[in-house]
């Protein structure tokens, strides 16, 4: 699973057949069914449509992808969320995060030993309490995000729900970029012994990422500075809309 995780970050277009072939080339004796099972455990999906990955509950309401044609020009217009697998010395945990699309500012996160909807909804409430209410929240079609509880939490705040096309990680590219930074700049640099160790490392990294790490995509600003300036833009846009 650790090898799959590192390989996927470098080659996110690898579906299970490609990953299976790669593992065989390294000398591992593994069948494709096991690779498929590990992809599901790790919450991975290729950037092109793949069958049966992050499969939603068929009873849950479907929502379209809303970000294709909108101009994301201020903070709190669009938030993205996702869950990633985090390897440790023995075993693994999951991390959910909410990120502001405009600024790449990490709004909230939570770490858990299971991918239940509760830990996702808790992180959403934490982000809203600290940063206000966004216009749109975008996620993939995993069952944690398509659950009635998570959808109701969004709708109760009148937040528009956007979901990626099935298996298309590139639709949620902002959070995917964060996962890559988090793993290469934090997780892979340490031999993580347990959950407390991971939580301490993550806390320090998120503080660094938001307040000190300069982003080329933000013209070498920090996410925090870009987020604050984006809030001013949002306030002005809301004022103009209210005046119409």
Image (cartoon, rainbow, N blue to C red):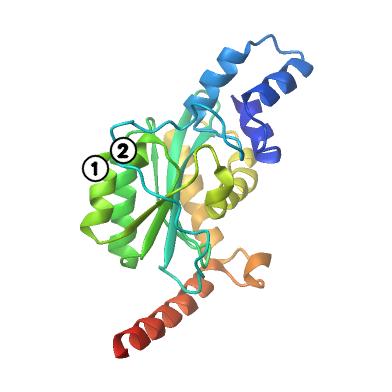
Residue 118 in the image: above or below residue 24: below
Which corner quadrant of the image does residue 6 belong to? top right
Place of residue 46 in the rendered image (x, y in percent of width and height, measured from the top left): 60, 35
Q: Residue at x 55, y 59 (%)?
A: 209
Which corner quadrant of the image does residue 222 belong to? bottom right
Label of residue 225 in the image: none
Q: Assess whether mark 1 and mark 2 are in contact (beta carbons under 8 angstroms).
A: yes
Which corner quadrant of the image does residue 236 belong to? bottom left
Image mark count: 2
- Looking at the image, is mark 2 or mark 1 earlier in the sequence? 2
Q: CA distance from mark 2 to mark 1?
A: 7 Å
Label of residue 117 in the image: 2
Dot 2: what SS?
helix
Quarter containing the C terminus: bottom left
Question: 221 or 41: nearer the eye?
Answer: 41
Question: 73 or 92: nearer the eye?
Answer: 73
Q: Return the residue at label 1.
A: 149
Horizontal side, residue 37 vs residue 23: left or right:
left
The residue sitting at the right extreme is 25
Q: For the residue carrying disc 1, how many other residues have a C-alpha within 10 Å: few (<14), some (14-19), or many (20+)?
A: some
Place of residue 80 in the rendered image (x, y in percent of width and height, measured from the top left): 45, 54
Q: Residue at x 61, y 32 (%)?
A: 5
Q: For the residue carrying disc 2, how many other residues have a C-alpha within 10 Å: few (<14), some (14-19), or many (20+)?
A: some
Place of residue 109 in the rendered image (x, y in percent of width and height, measured from the top left): 41, 50
**Which mark is nearer the camera, 2 or 1?**
1
Quarter containing the N terminus: top right
Question: 118 or 52: nearer the eye?
Answer: 52
Residue 161 in the image: above or below residue 228: above
Q: Residue at x 24, y 60 (%)?
A: 157
Dot 1: what SS?
helix
Question: 93 or 190: nearer the eye?
Answer: 93
């Amino acid at each position: 699973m650790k090898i799959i995780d590192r390989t996927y970050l470098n080659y996110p277009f690898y579906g299970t057949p490609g990953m299976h072939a790669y593992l065989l080339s390294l000398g591992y004796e593994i069948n494709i069914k096991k690779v498929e099972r590990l992809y599901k455990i790790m919450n991975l999906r290729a950037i092109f449509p793949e069958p049966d990955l992050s499969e939603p509950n068929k009873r849950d309401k479907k929502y379209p992808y809303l970000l294709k044609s909108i101009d994301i020009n201020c903070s709190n217009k669009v938030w993205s969320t996702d869950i990633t697998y985090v390897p440790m010395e023995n075993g693994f945990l999951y991390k959910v995060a909410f990120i502001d699309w405009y600024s790449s500012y990490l709004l909230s996160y939570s770490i858990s030993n299971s991918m239940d909807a509760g830990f996702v909804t808790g992180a959403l409430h934490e982000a809203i309490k600290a940063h206000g209410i966004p216009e749109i929240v975008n996620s993939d079609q995993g069952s944690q995000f398509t659950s009635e509880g998570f959808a109701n939490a969004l709708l109760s705040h009148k937040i528009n729900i956007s979901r990626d096309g099935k298996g298309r990680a590139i639709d949620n590219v902002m959070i995917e970029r964060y996962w890559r930074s988090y793993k290469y700049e934090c997780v892979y640099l340490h031999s993580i012994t347990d959950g407390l160790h991971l939580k301490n490392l993550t806390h320090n990294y998120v503080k660094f990422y938001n307040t000190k790490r300069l982003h080329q995509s933000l013209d070498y600003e920090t996410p925090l500075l870009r987020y604050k300036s984006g809030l001013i833009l949002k306030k002005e846009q809301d004022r103009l809309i209210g005046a119409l």
